Amino acid sequence: MRRRVAVTGVGLVSPLGVGTAENWRALMEGESGIGPITRFDVAEYPCRIAGEVKGFDPRNYVDKKDVKKSDLFIHYALAATRFAVDDSGLVIDERNSERVGVIIGSGMGGLPLIETMHKILTEKGPNRVSPFFIPALIVNMAAGQVSIHYGARGPNTSPATACTTGLHAVGDAFRVIQMGDADAMIAGGAEAVIGPLALAGFCAMRALSTRNDDPAHASRPWDADRDGFVMSEGAGIVVLEELESARRRGAPIYAEMIGYGMSADAYHLSAPHPEGDGAVRCMRAAIEDADIAREDIGYINAHGTSTPLGDLSEVHAVKRLFGDHAYKLAVSSTKSQTGHLLGAAGGLETGLLALAIHHQVLPATMNLDHPGEGCDLDFVPHHPRPARLDYGITNSFGFGGTNATVVMKRYSGD
């Protein structure tokens, strides 16, 4: 028999703020985390905006002597984990350390550090490259550092599945608890690649918005004037626990996680299937795994990146899967305020879905002034909306055609 899984802690670091409460406040008040890039000269780039995390001091979360030994994405992961673990009240000690695991992924790991060290190599020679270079940048070091810091000795892995990374991490952690391999998991994603090389690469693909004169309105999912996504950074971490264990210790329960689905488009390296084939199968698998009817779903926290092709593909998928019910449920994209955190997006949006269910409110899709052709669902435009929210899903889709969906339900104490 599969064990039940609760979300007992949420930790968020994003362009909206540092800390879960600040993220939720900014989300509900319609604030944007997007602004001009400040870290390097962007004069020659067609895109000059991003979602930078502001006011973050890694020394508040990492020992001062260790800050230079790890990349920024690891700092974000450690900070978000602290928020999540403190929120959950989970204590990890000798009694339970082997039953607590960590799954935290990253899409690109320490890419800016690679740029920095390559410059040092070419200008000053190999003897000047830091001995901490490799362990500071590889993807699994976020999970590794978290496990070391908290003494979590259970399952420890790190997916790297592009923009689906964070949600794969959460879904995999859900499975680990369901199947009895751990009683609690720290899971999510972290990303910090706002730098010259990543920006140049995405610009070369023409994937980014170039609304440089109006950054707060650049991320506009499903709007007719959407022109690409906005690259952002941060971390989203949740604490998942076996439900009975969480109940026994009186943990806060934001929502119950009940389903997980995955699929592949098998279509194109970077473009989604035009009719959302992979997304349909992914959402269907998650809902079937949850053992509920499609009509039970009341809200979708969509992938919704603000790209012309991706947004429409997801709309097609929702219509194909849900039929007439597609026009009765709500669909919104919190990326309209946060931008796209790439490998951290799924972790962030898992946390936001859990909070939405807990607070019984639908986050808005900001900047949706003129819905594009075919974009005719209830996208909760401009303002959050109170709602009875019993079941919701969150989607993440990544380059390579890799997809994930997680289903949550309102916890009623049964």
Image: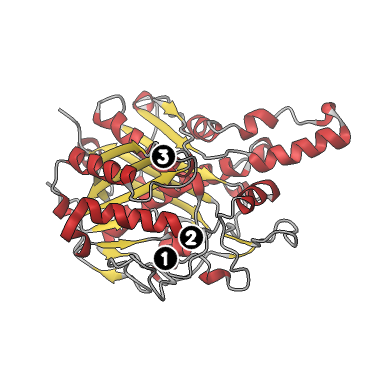
Residue 338 is labelled as 2
Determine if residue 305 is in view: no
Distance from disc 1 to disc 3, alpha carbons, whole Å, reads 34 Å
Number of disc labels: 3
Q: Are marks 1 and 2 in contact (CB under 8 Å)?
A: yes
Name the residue located 29 percent from the left edge and 41 percent from the top edge: 282
Q: Nearer the viewer, mark 1 or mark 2?
A: 2
Q: How far across and down, in percent of the image, does residue 127 sit? A: 84, 26
Q: Which residue is mark 1?
A: 27
Distance from disc 1 to disc 2, alpha carbons, whole Å, reads 8 Å
Amino acid carrying label 1: it is: Leu
Few, some or many C-alpha atoms within 10 Å of disc 3 (few <14, some 14-19, many ≥20)?
some
Q: Nearer the viewer, mark 2 or mark 3?
A: 3
Amino acid carrying label 3: it is: Tyr
Amino acid carrying label 2: it is: Thr
Few, some or many C-alpha atoms within 10 Å of disc 1 (few <14, some 14-19, many ≥20)?
many
Q: Are marks 2 and 3 in contact (CB under 8 Å)?
A: no
Q: Which residue is mark 3?
A: 267
Question: In the rendered structure, which disc, 2 or 3, sits on the residue that comes first in sequence?
Answer: 3
